[in-house]
Image (cartoon, rainbow, N blue to C red):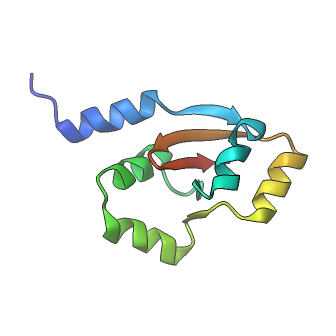
């Protein structure tokens, strides 16, 4: 049985995805490395595209507003609501989805 390397990479990212409280993510927000992924997108797929440096796809999502740095407003809302966010890491970025 031959396994596709892309599928292996996505499976690894999926295993590294978990929910984290906003309080544990604030330092990444302060460092400017926290990236919001709209719920219309699959977090693992976005993380994979970041990991393979697919600039065309990422730029398209940025232009559509589906992926962006976490805003001050989002941070305040999540702090007030003690939010749990789906999270995965693609260094130097931490991707989150509400």
The percent coordinates of residue 88 (x first, y second) are 52, 40
Above/below status of 59 relative to 86: below
- Residue situated furthest bottom in the rendering: 63
Report the residue at 84% width, 56% height from top: 76
- Residue situated furthest front in the rendering: 31
Figure quadrant of residue 20: top right
The percent coordinates of residue 2 (x first, y second) are 9, 27
Q: Which of 23/39 is in front?
A: 23
Report the residue at 49% width, 78% height from top: 63
Does residue 48 appear left or right of residue 33 in this picture?
A: left
**Quarter occupied by the N terminus:** top left
The percent coordinates of residue 93 (x first, y second) are 50, 50
Above/below status of 60 relative to 92: below
Does residue 28 appear left or right of residue 90 in this picture?
A: right
- Residue situated furthest top in the rendering: 1
Report the residue at 70% width, 54% height from top: 30
Figure quadrant of residue 77: bottom right
Above/below status of 82 relative to 53: above
Does residue 13 appear left or right of residue 25 in this picture?
A: left
Tally of marks: 0
- Residue situated furthest right in the rendering: 80
Does residue 7 appear left or right of residue 83 in this picture?
A: left
Q: Which of 80/91 is in front?
A: 91
Report the residue at 76% width, 59% height from top: 74
Figure quadrant of residue 10: top left
The percent coordinates of residue 38 (x first, y second) are 59, 58
Q: Which of 16/28 is in front?
A: 28
């Amino acid at each position: 049985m031959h396994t596709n390397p892309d599928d292996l990479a996505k499976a690894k990212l999926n295993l590294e995805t978990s929910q984290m409280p906003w309080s544990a993510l604030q330092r990444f927000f302060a460092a400017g490395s926290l990236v919001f992924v709209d719920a219309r997108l699959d977090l693992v797929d976005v993380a994979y595209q970041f990991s393979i440096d697919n600039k065309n796809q990422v730029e398209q999502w940025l232009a559509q507003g589906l992926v962006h740095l976490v805003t001050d407003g989002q941070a305040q809302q999540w702090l007030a609501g003690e939010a749990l966010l789906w999270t995965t890491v693609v260094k130097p970025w931490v991707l989150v989805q509400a």
